């Protein structure tokens, strides 16, 4: 099976391991019985006299300076806490003596003690009495059996003399099913760790699993191939406006599906449809109903708009909605035209742009040939079915036919049209929307106040748009390259279509626009 690759197995195993680590950490924290634990740490050990080794220089006033024994004094703040997972009662202390814990300050003598508890734990103070075992002698401090809920603590401020700052401090005592030990927290009021060491190890394991899985996804250099890859050769004909999309789709398909070879040969929508039909007839054989070959020719044709009724054997697939724009030379600063104005221009009724409020420049119409789908869309969608005035020039500069009121030429490609409009003052042409974007020397025109925009199609009445059809000779076999390529365009290729400024029909918004245009 294709999915049973080394990368996929590692990805699945790391995902399962991460899930088990998560469940294990939660289960361990909540269900596994653990030892009770009293932790302690020194939060402060500082000199308050001027004759203390390693205590550093200090200045003193009041009692600190007047009491003779204070010259060698130190202060230690000791925090004692329940940093286990279970509460500790006074019965959990196992020593035979009255007190529960013993703190030893090696090399120093205890001179005084103050006990504090955090807000809300004032009741702990009732345990710190001589009757409960609180006392000190020499370097030893006896601490009563103080019950502590989980996370609860108290602090001991101990006045010491006779030893250096940083001397050894130990605490001991017996805890039933537990222990007394120093903990690792060092900041003054830090809380004990939320998770135990085993739980932290499991959390690290989970993190490593997630990182490994993400690395496999990011670093693998091959994307999964599309479903139902096909091999062989395919030639894509038709629309020059849609040709950039077709070329990128072909390149990506060939990369994803080794063994496929797709050639894009775009010479216009009408010529592509006609060539597809001609080749299909030859491929099928004479019209006696008996085909010399099975299937259909390895051809596919994109068309800006629907084919005519003269090609009944061609099967259509709606691929995208293409938006087109009228483009005008920058010497004419007009930005918007009404549909009646556009129709007058292409009938030859407007000979100079000053008639529409522009500069004194003659109108020059730069058009596409009769096989162009962009031109056909202009005539159906903008000119209300009318044809453009006949061509009167071969070079778009000089008028060869004096009977035609304006200069009009026909060129073979969209790029040629845009080049001519850019360099000829007063020139007007048309193009697929994205191709005409950000070009110098020309600008796109709004129609009836609506800007040419794919994003606004569902809300605007912009008329110069058309469905992009893909035609095959009959329905291609499901395992054919033509069928697979079309499925790729409507699936994996949606981002390619969007990038080139078209709206895919296979999206919710695109499906609505495609359906409206079909019904219209």
Image: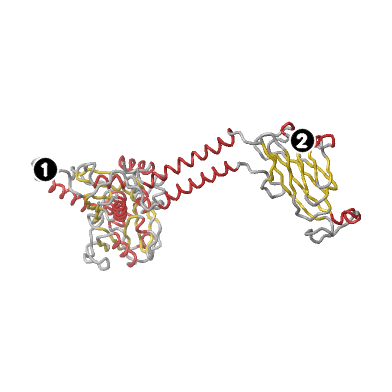
Badge nearest the viewer, 1 or 2: 2
| Residue 109 coordinates in the image, percent (x, y) | 83, 49
| Residue 310 coordinates in the image, percent (x, y) | 18, 45
How many residues crowd around disc 1 within 10 Å: few (fewer than 14), some, or many (20 or more)?
A: some
Mark 2 residue element:
loop
How far apart, in angstroms, are the residues tagged by discs 1 and 2?
102 Å
Q: Which residue is mark 1?
A: 291
Q: Which residue is mark 2?
A: 145
How many numbered marks are there? 2
- For residue 14, which quarter of the picture? top left
- Determine whether, in the image, residue 289 is placed left or right of residue 103: left
Q: Are marks 1 and 2 in contact (CB under 8 Å)?
A: no
User: As drawn, which residue projects farthest toward the front?
Assistant: 96
- Determine whether, in the image, residue 365 is placed left or right of residue 199: left
- Identify which residue is drawn at 74% across, 32% down: 90
Foreground residue among 292 and 467: 292
Mark 1 residue element:
loop
Q: Reading the chain from its start, which is encountered first: label 1 or label 2?
A: 2
| Residue 233 coordinates in the image, percent (x, y) | 21, 52
């Amino acid at each position: 099976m294709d999915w049973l690759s080394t990368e996929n197995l590692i990805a699945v195993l790391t995902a399962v391991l991460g899930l088990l680590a998560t469940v294990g950490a939660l289960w361990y924290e909540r269900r596994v019985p653990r030892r009770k634990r009293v932790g302690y740490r020194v939060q402060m050990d500082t000199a308050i006299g001027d004759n203390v080794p390693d205590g550093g220089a200090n200045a003193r006033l009041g009692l600190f300076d007047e009491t003779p024994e204070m010259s060698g004094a130190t202060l230690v703040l000791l925090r004692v806490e329940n940093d286990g997972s279970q509460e500790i009662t006074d019965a959990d202390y196992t020593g035979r003596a009255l007190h529960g814990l013993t703190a030893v300050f090696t090399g120093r003598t205890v001179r005084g003690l103050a006990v504090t508890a955090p807000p809300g734990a004032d009741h702990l103070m009732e345990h710190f009495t001589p009757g409960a075992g609180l006392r000190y002698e020499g370097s030893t401090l006896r601490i009563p059996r103080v019950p502590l809920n989980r996370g609860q603590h108290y602090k001991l401020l101990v006045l010491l003399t006779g030893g250096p700052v940083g001397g050894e401090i130990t605490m001991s005592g017996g805890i039933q099913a537990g222990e007394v030990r120093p903990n690792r927290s060092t900041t003054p009021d830090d809380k004990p760790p939320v998770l135990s060491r085993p739980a932290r190890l499991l959390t690290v394991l989970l993190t490593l699993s997630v990182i490994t899985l993400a690395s496999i996804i990011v670093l693998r250099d091959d994307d999964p191939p599309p479903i139902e890859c096909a091999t062989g050769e395919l030639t894509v004909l038709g629309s020059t406006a849609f040709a950039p999309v077709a070329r990128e789709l072909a390149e990506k398909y060939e990369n994803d599906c080794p063994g496929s070879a797709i050639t894009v040969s775009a010479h216009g929508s009408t010529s592509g449809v006609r060539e597809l039909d001609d080749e299909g007839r030859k491929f099928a054989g004479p019209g006696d109903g008996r085909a010399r070959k099975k299937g259909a020719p390895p051809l596919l044709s994109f068309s800006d708009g629907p084919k005519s009724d003269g090609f009944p054997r061609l099967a259509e697939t709606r691929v995208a909605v293409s938006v087109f724009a009228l483009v005008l030379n920058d010497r004419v600063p007009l930005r918007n035209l009404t549909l009646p104005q556009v129709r007058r221009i292409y009938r030859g009724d407007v000979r100079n742009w000053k008639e529409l409020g522009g500069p004194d420049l003659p109108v020059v119409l730069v058009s596409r040939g009769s096989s162009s789908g962009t031109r056909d869309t202009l005539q159906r969608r903008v000119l209300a079915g009318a044809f453009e005035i006949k061509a009167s020039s071969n070079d778009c500069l000089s008028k060869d036919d004096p009977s035609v009121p304006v200069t009009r030429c026909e060129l073979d490609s969209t790029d040629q049209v845009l080049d001519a409009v850019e360099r000829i003052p007063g020139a007007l042409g048309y193009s697929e929307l994205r191709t005409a974007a950000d070009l110098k020397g020309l600008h796109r025109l709004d129609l009836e106040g609506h800007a040419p925009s794919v994003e606004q199609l569902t809300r605007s009445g912009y008329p110069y748009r058309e469905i992009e059809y893909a035609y095959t000779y009959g329905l291609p076999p499901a395992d054919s390259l033509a069928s697979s390529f079309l499925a790729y365009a409507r699936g994996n290729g949606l981002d390619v279509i969007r990038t080139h400024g078209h709206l895919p029909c296979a999206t919710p918004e695109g499906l609505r626009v495609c359906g409206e245009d079909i019904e219209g």
